[in-house]
Amino acid sequence: MFGWEYPPLHLGGLGVACQGLVQGLLKTGVQVTLVLPHPHTQSQEHDVISPKEHTTHTVRVQSMLGPYMNHDQYFRTISAVSKEMQQVYGHDLPEAVMHFTETSVDLTKDVEADVVHCHDWMTYGAGARAAKHHNKPLVAHIHATELDRTNFSPNQWIYDQERMGFEAADRVIAVSQYTKNILVEHYGIAAEKIHVVHNGSSEDHLPHNRVTSITRTKKQEPMVLFLGRLTLQKGPIQFLEMAKHVHQHRAEVQFVVAGEGNMLGEMIHKTKELALEKNVTFLGKVTSKEARKLYRTADCFVMPSLSEPFGLVALEAISHGTPVVISKQSGVSEVVGHGFKVDFWDTAKMADCVLTILRETPLAQQLRSEAPRSLAYLRWEHQAGHVRSVYQDLLKPR
Amino acid sequence: MQHKHSHPSVCFYFQVHQPYRLRDLRFGDVGAEGTEYFDEVKNRDIFRKVAEKCYLPANKLILDLVQQYPDFQVSYSLSGVFLRQCQEYGPDVLESFKALAQTGKVEFLAETYFHSLSSLKSLSEFVEQVSTQVELIENIFGVRPRVFRNTELIYSNELAHIARLMGFSGMLAEGADHLLEGRNPNDPFIPPQFTLPNDVQKIVRKFRPYAKAPRNISVLLKNYKLSDDVAFRFSDRSWIGYPLTAERFTDWLMQSGGTSVNLFMDYETFGEHQWADTGIFDFLRSLPKIWQERGIRAITPSEVIRTHHRRFKHVYDAHTHVSWADSERDLSAWQENHIQRSALDALFALEEKVKATRDPELLDIWRKLQTSDHFYYMCTKYWSDGDVHKYFSPYDSPYEAYRRFSHAVCDLRERVARYPSHK
């Protein structure tokens, strides 16, 4: 299995989903050899950054590639290392990917696999080469397309890498029907070869015993939470626009933005422009412990993504008993019944859902108790079972 | 007197109702001047769509049939809010119902004017709405209803006795398996005998439509198996009975025994739930001919009571509420989850204050919000399995239904609080 990131070293949902899937697969009796890009600078202390599952065999490939990178970001990263190292890693993104592909195929040439499974475009080249080398079926898992990340203005080279992967694959696993539709409509991939396997949630789904009623009454102001990378895809600007609408009716409501990303400057600027300095707090990147605390304190979690293949954060919020308002342009909206779903551009309506949740205690209570319960069937073990059956189908003698 | 029937007669009752659906109300509408709650455009569109697909063609067909076949009669319950929408959006529909009434072969039943859940919350409000509806039916069709059916066939022993005390000779109810205990729903039933508490009697007497109450009340039970064969399964290709022919259905009716097969269903079954291209109109058209050939009469609920309910009657004992909704056949379609219950509570918490204003507009708004559909849209019973339940609702989700409704209730609360005479 070729991945890009894996907890605890991860930036976003891909790493979490990979971990959940790997753990789920192990429970269903599938053995996994995990191949991950690995920056040179941290290579000595693997133990901290290696996956903890004992039955997983991990192969680390030295690379400066980071998840969710684009050409510019790779350029900034590579510029920081010496000229000699640049030779090794590749001067630009295509070279780096080629380097990763070659090295990882080489390092795994003796691994005896039944299926080659790769996650998102950076590993598709490696997956395709490895599958060809071993003469085994290829599964391309798609967590996010270039179209999602760029609001449908893709970098052509990355788009081509993705399409090459989908076409080379014997089966494609999409994290939602929403993503499957994008592959069919915008990549021309045959619907029959795409299987939808929704992500699971890593949290347990029993409603948490929030000490809400007591702590909540003591808390002065209601709080609305955004948690995610500050990139175009995640709709942070929409979050601020929503905040403005809420603010017009209830000036005391606080908005917390957790996460980092290239739009931080623009976000701060926009906050000033909307005169929300006193109501919006930027926390930067938060640890998972801090995130849990934020979920528990928040009165409402808003995920206004412009195009979200899945949206694990929404499940995390739900599993902590936080009422959610999520973008209709998301995969997670296919599995969340107990919550509000709004078009990402309709920030006035988004605000109205937030205001209703803040005003109506019975509504908030029902969302807190019902939403986590309804996710019980979305356990990773269960979802990994679907992936396993895709493998089994591929391995059937024909 | 005709020869003794060895097979049952048939009793058709069609429910005709349209709610006033809510606008996409916003937080800022609460407390604003003259906020309009109901979605005029959507309500008109839906009314016209259903009128073209169901009401007009179905009424035309039924008119043909009652004129052509001497032993073919039917009954309707038209909610007050439906009749009001007829006046607003469909005079043609109203005329076609009047034409049916003029044949003298169609019975109109009584119900709450607002197709409301008032029977669960306020006795005086409930009885008052029934009286309003009885007046309305008499004004439009010239006949005072004698048989009562409550919203969505919500029924209990107590409600049956309240209906009796209101002056009705019969009441319709769901023939629920757990209450029938193996008995045939086609047989005549009565509620268990008991006396209503004095305070209840007093309220009923104060607001009731009739000055006198009969000694007993008959209960007509819906034969849900045969009713649902038409209403739900008619076009279901995976159903063993598909395709359902008039001949086969008549065989089943004749075999089902008892005295009256009560076929109760939404009128929208014809042309709207089951589209015309499923053959539902042809099916309905061919029934009276076959029934005439086989000596089966289709009669009204009042006629069922006159003909069959003189003899031995079974006791239908409903300690708790039954209804015709969902497989549970209880109140859970409207009053299961937290938001449904708190929405209805919040609305009825305003009763005294709304009534104290004596403002007809505020009263009317408050009552339109009692329509059962608002609470049905908030149902989350099949929501939890993640499988997005195909849901008959004008809104996106149960939570969207609650969002709009809660804004309306909040605004109404503020309007009542602002009302001059109330200070």
Image (cartoon, grey):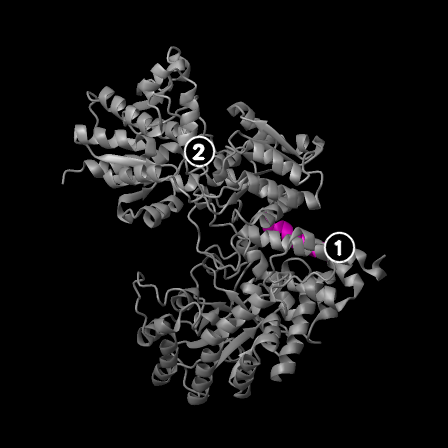
Q: Report which residue position mark 2 lands on.
A: A201
Is residue B214 covered in magenta? Answer: no
Is residue B343 covered in magenta? Answer: yes
Q: Please determine whether, in this image, residue A137 is positioned above or below residue B244.
A: above
x and y, in percent, of residue A265 in the image = 57, 32
Q: Please determine whether, in this image, residue A338 is positioned above or below residue B265.
A: above
x and y, in percent, of residue B179 in the image = 49, 58
Q: Please determine whether, in this image, residue B124 is positioned above or below residue B13.
A: above
Q: Nearer the viewer, residue B239 or B317?
A: B239
- Image-quadrant location for residue B159: bottom right
User: Is residue B187 among the parts visible in the rendering?
Assistant: no
Q: What residue type is labelled 1?
A: Glu
x and y, in percent, of residue A378 in the image = 41, 37
Q: In which quarter of the image is the C terminus of chain B?
A: bottom right
x and y, in percent, of residue A342 in the image = 53, 48
Q: Which of A393 and A353 is in front in this view?
A: A353
Q: What stretch is highlighted in magenta?
A: B339-350
Mark-to-mark CA distance, 2 and 1: 42 Å
- The numbered dot on residue A74 is none
Question: Taken as a whole, is the magenta stretch helix, strand or loop?
Answer: helix
User: Is residue B19 among the parts visible in the rendering?
Assistant: yes
**Chain bearing mark 1:** B
Q: On the same chain: label 2 and label 1?
A: no
Decide if residue A335 is on the left or right side of residue B373.
Answer: left
